[in-house]
Amino acid sequence: MSVKSQFSHQDVEVLTTRPLYDGFFKMVQYKLKHRLFAGGWSSEVTREMFERGHAVAVLPYDPVTQEFVLIEQFRLGAMATSQSPWLIEVIAGMIDTGYSPEEVCHKEAREEAGIELQHLTKACSYLSSPGGTTERLHIYIAQTDATQADGLHGVEHESEDILVHRIAQKQAKEWLENGRIDNAAAIIALQYFFLNKQQILESWQEP
């Protein structure tokens, strides 16, 4: 049984918004009030929100070789808590104005791994961290020819330095279980694949 919230956008009153930073990303300060579960309205709440836009992440899989195409790159945000800030990830990118999520999947697959995608399949979407950012990430699974995945990739003006990996299905599952893969998009995409593998592969075979 689904649980429907008793509240909606109409139960929030945004009093002011103030830009705090406008660079590669944006930071905006909100002052607002919202309805309370016990009735009435909250006092004025101040929150800073990280406005980074929305993104896609795609997990390419080759059903012939039974391999995933994953990428490795440096992530500054991992330095505080990870043994190494070079992370094993899925292909991902921001959804720029004028592009659909599906178009971004294909573009990023070429830029970050040098591969083409077939049977692009929407898995799910989720809010990355709604207490601090508005970002929504859309997860896709796609078929690819893993034998074409090799080498170094990335867009130079975006300072990308990406190493492409062909990872056996069994190895990826072990990395998922032992924490070698520990970023949200990759975890969610792989978990979705392993939970729905048969259905996904059957859908790719449909005319």
Image (cartoon, rainbow, N blue to C red):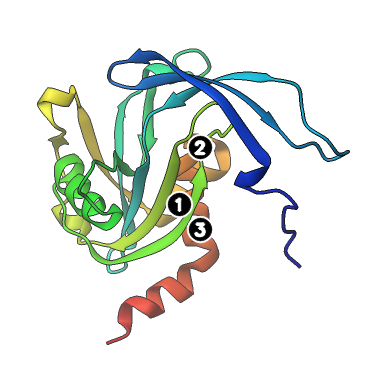
- Circle 1 sits on which residue? 189
Find residue 137 and report its horizontal and vertical position in percent: 43, 44
Crowding around mark 3 (Cα neighbors within 10 Å: few <14, some 14 to 19, many 20+) is: some
Determine whether, in the image, residue 117 is placed left or right of residue 190.
left
- Circle 3 sits on which residue? 192
Determine whether, in the image, residue 161 is placed left or right of residue 89.
left
In the rendered view of the protein, which quadrant contains the N terminus?
bottom right
Q: Closer to the observer: label 2 or label 1?
A: 2
- Between 4 and 205, the one lying in front of the other is 4
Gap in angstroms between the C-alphas marked 3 and 2: 16 Å
Find residue 187 and report its horizontal and vertical position in percent: 50, 44
In the rendered view of the protein, which quadrant contains the C terminus?
bottom left
181, above or below 191, in the image:
above
Query: Looking at the image, which residue is at 37% across and 29% down?
Result: 52
Mark 3 vs 2, N-terminal side: 2
Q: Please report contact status of discs 1 and 3: CB closer than 8 Å, yes or no.
A: yes
Find residue 8 and report its horizontal and vertical position in percent: 65, 49
- Between 48 and 91, the one lying in front of the other is 48
Callout 3 secondary element? helix
Crowding around mark 1 (Cα neighbors within 10 Å: few <14, some 14 to 19, many 20+) is: many
185, above or below 31, in the image:
below
Identify which amino acid the numbered label 3 is placed on: Tyr
Query: Looking at the image, which residue is at 16% across and 44% down?
Result: 150
